[in-house]
Image (tube, rainbow, N blue to C red):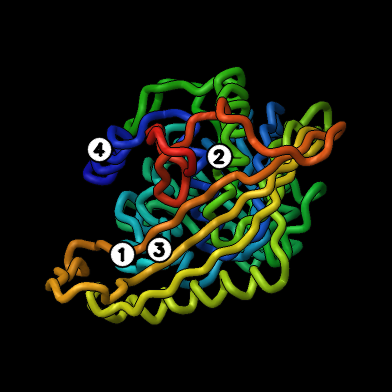
Amino acid sequence: EELTDRLKGILKAYPCDVGVLKELVQNADDAGATEIHFIVDPRNHPTHQLLSKNWKELQGPALCVYNNRPFSEEDLEGIQRLGIGSKTDDPTKTGQYGIGFNAVYHLTDCPSFITNGDTLCILDPHCRYAPEATKENPGRIIGPIGAEERSDFRDVFPCYLENLFDLTSATMFRLPLRTQNTSSISQRRVSYTEMMTFMNLLAYEAKEIILFLNHVKTITLSEIKGDQLTEIYSVTAQLTPHDEAERARLTNHIKISKTLETNQIEWLGITYSLIVQEHGLRQEKWLIHQCIGLQRSTSEEVPNGKSFGLLPRGGIAAKVSEKSESSKFHFNKRSEPRHKAFCFLPLPVNTGLPVH
């Protein structure tokens, strides 16, 4: 009850909307993934050979989320802290498998994933689905997955889309959609129609989401139709090798800075171009500046924000040109879309400025 109450409290702070999917983008970026792929699987899978009797409730429609990075031991440890989070003291992370991941309980009662092709991790706050789950250990890690497990539980593993994705050195999350009112965490049901609405909203924002990410360069949205993977939308970000190196230099500077008081962090700023390509739609060129630290332009004493979890970090993105499939680059008109405030990802706040 303590755990489910904690999760219910977290869900009150996170509306059940497209922000749940954006949290997963954030997590993938922090893990160092360069690609994330959202797949709606509307199918009902076989229920004969499963991990437990109740597991059949998880064999229906689901959201699957692929990223091309495996879990580290630290990640596995962190994600098991249900309702707590794991990265609150690391300013280089925007939420890697921390408290934000718990937003997925808006969609599901039992998130699980296969990582590196041989480890299955089940998070089960109800202790209803994972074999031998207890209130002290509300879940289960099964691995390395061998031929015996794949035979004994043969209806489980196809749900992780191993026939469509190579999960070696990668991770596939499976979030079975909550379709019944049996949850102690949330009474909200999530239909296939609502899930597709979230996907469409994510597609609408994806070209903004990708601007300030550190690693993710490709966001793809798809649906399983029949047994085929059908793409809905994709967006990619392209940088020159020099600009890649500059971003890496900033990341390393931030890692070093996390040991310092915030008023002792030496200023470092980088400016680079980013080409954002929407599949089959348009290409945009953005000029981006990111920086951290303080420039010593005044003798005024600067307070230390470290104890408050603050960091003197900022960024700005200006679109300088765009083209569609049928036109050349042209400069933006003054009536271009509203520009937002970001906390790495776009916030629902229009600033009135001509830049993000």
Q: Secondary structure at mark 4?
A: helix
The amino acid pointed to by label 4 is Gly
Mark with earlier residue (3, 4): 4
Compare marks 3 and 1 and give the one earlier in the sequence.
3
The kind of residue on which mark 1 rests is Pro
User: Which SS class for mark 1?
Assistant: loop
Residue with the mark numbered 1: 312
The residue identified by callout 2 is 175
Residue 186 in the figure: left or right of residue 197: left
348 left or right of 337? Answer: left
Q: How many neighbours does mark 1 have within 10 angstroms: few (below 14), some (14-19), or many (20 or more)?
A: some
Spatial separation of the CA atoms under disc 1 and disc 2: 36 Å
Spatial CA span between label 2 and label 3: 18 Å
Cα gap from disc 1 to disc 4, whole angstroms: 30 Å
Q: In the image, what residue occupies the spot 78% across and 33% down?
A: 281
- Classify 10 Å Cα crowding around label 3: few (below 14), some (14-19), many (20 and above): some
Tell me the amino acid under the disc marked 3: Gly
Task: Locate residue 145: give its quadrant.
Answer: bottom right
Q: Is residue 234 visible?
A: no
According to the picture, the residue beneath numbered tag 3 turns out to be: 78
Tell me where residue 335 appears, x and y as whole percent.
56, 25
Instruction: Point out the tag, 1 or 2, that comes first from the N-terminus.
Output: 2
**Mark 4 highlights which residue?**
9
